[in-house]
Amino acid sequence: MSDFELTKKLINEVEFFIVNFPSHIENVYNTMTRSVKYELVIAGLNNLKKLSFLNRVRIFHIITKRNYIYLGEFVDWINKNYKGIFLLNFCYVRNKGRVKNNKNILPKYSETSKFIKLALAKSKLYGIKAVIQNIPLCVIDGFEGFSFEFHRFKRGDHVFERGVELPLNIEKCKQCSLKVGCCGARKDYICVYGDKELKTSKKDINSIREERF
Ligand code: SF4
């Protein structure tokens, strides 16, 4: 994508671009990706912008301990530079692969919640379509309509994409009114932080509106 001529050719063949972009701050990006490709990604996004192809770009933004405090700022930055993107796909980091129960990578729901809500609120304010994946609905109370899994439930799809591990069947979730549209108690998270932050809801799931833009 950083090569303009190549990108120009590619846009005739590709329907969508998925860009893994965990930070607009270069040193955070480099730490999270263990690479120095920040400038190349920016060049790629600029090429797509020049070619008026941003409306076919989905930015995938993994939330970890290293970037969650910048979530609101990240949305401001996207709005300023790449407002026309198709989708901002936030995803709570899974405790898999190189995360290995590391609390310096895997943040607690309770510390990230207000930053996530801020980012979602800003996305809506700016008219940037956004979803958040892999986070229990009780953690984003009031913002459930942005949940990727909730959208799948509303569409009538299976809540979990193929290959995604099913949640733990804990008592709090068994009694929860939101269970059918929620990613639930994630085993990989619970094994590090337990289930204290999860809260059984009595909210009517049909009263929750999917966020549309
Ligand atoms: S209690 Fe369980 S089912 Fe209910 S919202 Fe929280 S994680 Fe989802």
Image (cartoon, rainbow, N blue to C red):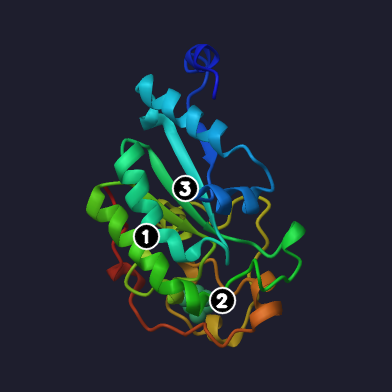
Q: Nearer the viewer, residue 96 or 173?
A: 96
Q: Earlier in the sequence, mark 1 or mark 2?
A: 1
Q: Is residue 46 above or below residue 126?
A: above
Residue 78 image point, x, y percent: 36, 45
Crowding near the residue tagged with mark 3, few <14, some 14–19, many ≥20 C-alpha atoms within 10 Å: some
**Image quarter of the N terminus:** top right
- Using the image, tell me which numbered label, if any, was put on residue 23: none
> Is the Cβ of the residue at disc 1 closer than 8 Å to that at disc 2?
no
Residue at 49 percent across and 79 percent down: it is 110
Residue 102 image point, x, y percent: 71, 70
The nearer-to-camera label among 1 and 3 is 3
Q: In the image, 130: left or right of 15? A: left
Residue at 57 percent across and 51 percent down: it is 27
Q: Earlier in the sequence, mark 2 or mark 3?
A: 3
The CA span between labels 1 and 2 is 18 Å
The CA span between labels 1 and 3 is 11 Å
Mark 1 secondary-structure assignment: helix
Residue under label 3, please give it. 24
> Is the Cβ of the residue at disc 2 closer than 8 Å to that at disc 3?
no
Residue at 32 percent across and 72 percent down: it is 142
Q: Earlier in the sequence, mark 1 or mark 3?
A: 3
Q: Is residue 43 above or below residue 161?
A: above
Q: In the image, 42: left or right of 27? A: left
Residue under label 1, please give it. 72
Residue under label 2, please give it. 108
Crowding near the residue tagged with mark 2, few <14, some 14–19, many ≥20 C-alpha atoms within 10 Å: some
Amino acid residing under circle 2: Lys
Residue 38 image point, x, y percent: 56, 39
